[in-house]
Image (cartoon, helix red, strand yellow):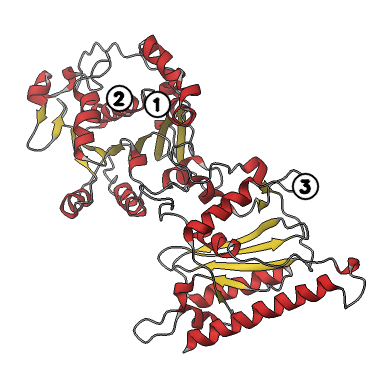
Amino acid sequence: MEARVRDPFRPNERQQEFFAACDEPGIEEILIDGSIRAGKTQACCKKLVAWAWQYGGRYLIARRTYRELRDSTQVVFLRGEGGLPPACPPELLRGGSVATGYRASDDAVFLQNGAEIMFRSLENDPGALAKLRNLSLNAAFIDQVEELDDDLYLQLYEELLGRLSDPRGPGKMLLAANPGPVDHWIYQRFVDPDTAVAWAKRVHVTLMDNERHLDPRYVDSRLRTKYSNPDYYKRFILGEWGAFGGKRFKAWNPVLHVTKPFAVPDWWEVMEAIDYGYAHPFCCLWIAVSPQGRWYVIREHYEKERALGYHARVIKRVRQELGVSPSVTWIDPSTGRMDRGEESVQMELADQMIYTARAQNDRLGGWARLDEMLTTLLEDGKPWLQVFEGCRNLIRELPSAKVKDGSDDIDKKNDHALDSLRYAIMSRPPLPVDPEEEEDDTDIRSLFARRRVAQRELEAEQDLYLGAL
C-alpha cells in the first residue's frame, strides 16, 4: 500500500546513525541513550512506524508505568511534542486521523495496511505481564528502559525478546534510555565493553546533538548546570552513565584507586572476606596489607546460584594461584545461624575446610571507615585503599552505591562486594614486618605481630565452636 506523507521531520546526525544501526544485519537490540531532549523517543517511534508500514503485523511500545507511557511516549507518537510533528504521521493511520486510527479500548493504533501498534506498561501486574508473554511480535520499543532497574525486569526483557517471533518483520528490540548507575543491567548489556553482547548496538547522544531542534534559551539554561549542578550536567546533558546524585562514596576515582596487579610478597598480611548469597551473588575478596599500612583488594570471586562446595573449591584454588595462606576469613555473622535445625552456612564451609570468623557488622561504621580509606593519602601520595583492576564487581559497585533515603546507610542493592570489603575493613590487622628487617626472633615488633595472629586464630576457633553449639 502507498500513501503520500508530508513529514517535516529531519533527523539529526545521531538519529541517522541510530536508523542505520537498526537496519544492520546481525544486530537484534539497538539502544539509543544519553541526554534528555536529544530526540531518543522520537527516533525509536519513527523507526517502529517505518517497520510497521513496511512489514505489517503487530508491534509493541512499552514503558514501566502506564501514566508515563500515556503522558510522554504516547504524546510523542500520536500528537508530537516540542514543536515537532507526531512520530506517526496521521495519514498512515486507519481513516487518516488519530480519531479513527486509535482504539482506546485496546490502547492501540491501527495503520491503513492493517499493522497494529500496542501501548503497554510494564508495571508489576501479573495479569498485564501474562498478556505480554502471550504475544507474537514483529518488533518492540521500550522507552526509558533505565527505569526497569530490577533483576526481575531483566528476566521480563528476555521474555519479551522471545516474543519477537513473527517471521514477517525485523524481529528487533529498540530501547531509549537516560543514563543511570553502572551496575544497571542495560549498562552491562550495551555499554560496558567487557560484558556487552555481540548482537546489540548502542548509539550515544548529548544535548548538543539535537540543539537545532531546541529553543536556544532552553539549551543555554541546561548548559549552565555544568557549574550549578555538575552531576545533573554529566548525566542529563552529556549523557554519562554513573553520574547521579546521592552517591555514597563520592571520593571514589578509578584513576586514583584502581591499580595494576603485582605479586604480593608472601610475608604480607592477607585476609579473606565473604558475603554469602545463593540467589544473590556469593562474594569473596582477598585483601593484602602492606608494611606501610596500605590495603590492596587483590582478587574477587563473585558468582550466584552455586552450592557452597563449589565456592569452597574456588577459594582453595585462588589461594593456590595467589600463593597465600590467609590469616583470617571474615564472614557475615548472620551465617552462623542455624535455621530449622539445619547446619549453618559457617558450619557447612567448615565441613569444606574453609574456616571463618564472624565479622563486625556495623554498617554505618563500616561505610565511614571506607570513606576514610578512600580519602586518606599515605606518604607516597596515593590513597590508603587500592583495588586491583581485575576486581570488576567491586569497581562497579563502589561508584554505584547510593545513599538510602532518610538514613546514612546505602541502598541494599548490588552491594555484595561492598559488604565483603566492609567485613574486612572493620577488623584491625597488624602491619606485616619484613623478615629481612628483623634483628632476631626476639624483635619486639615480630613478637607482637605473632601474638596478634595467634589471638585472631584463637578467636576464629572460638567463633566456630560457639556456632556449632
Determine contact: label 3, label 2, CB under 8 Å: no
Give residue 19's mark.
1
Which three-letter amino acid code belongs to the residue tagged 3?
Glu
- In the displayed image of the protein, which residue is found farthest to the bottom? 469
- Residue 286 picture quarter: bottom right
Q: Give the x, y percent position of residue 280.
A: 42, 63
Q: Give the x, y percent position of residue 126.
A: 19, 55
Q: Toward the viewer: 89 or 23? A: 89
Q: Give the x, y percent position of residue 362.
A: 49, 63
Which three-letter amino acid code belongs to the residue tagged 2?
Lys
Determine contact: label 2, label 1, CB under 8 Å: yes
Q: Toward the viewer: 399 or 303? A: 399
Give residue 248's mark.
none
Q: Which residue is mark 3?
A: 379
Q: Which residue is mark 2?
A: 46
Mark 3, other Cα within 10 Å: few <14 / some 14–19 / many ≥20: few
Query: Is 272 rendered above or below residue 97?
Result: below
Query: Is 332 rendered above or below residue 187?
Result: below
Q: Residue at x 26, y 32 (%)?
A: 55
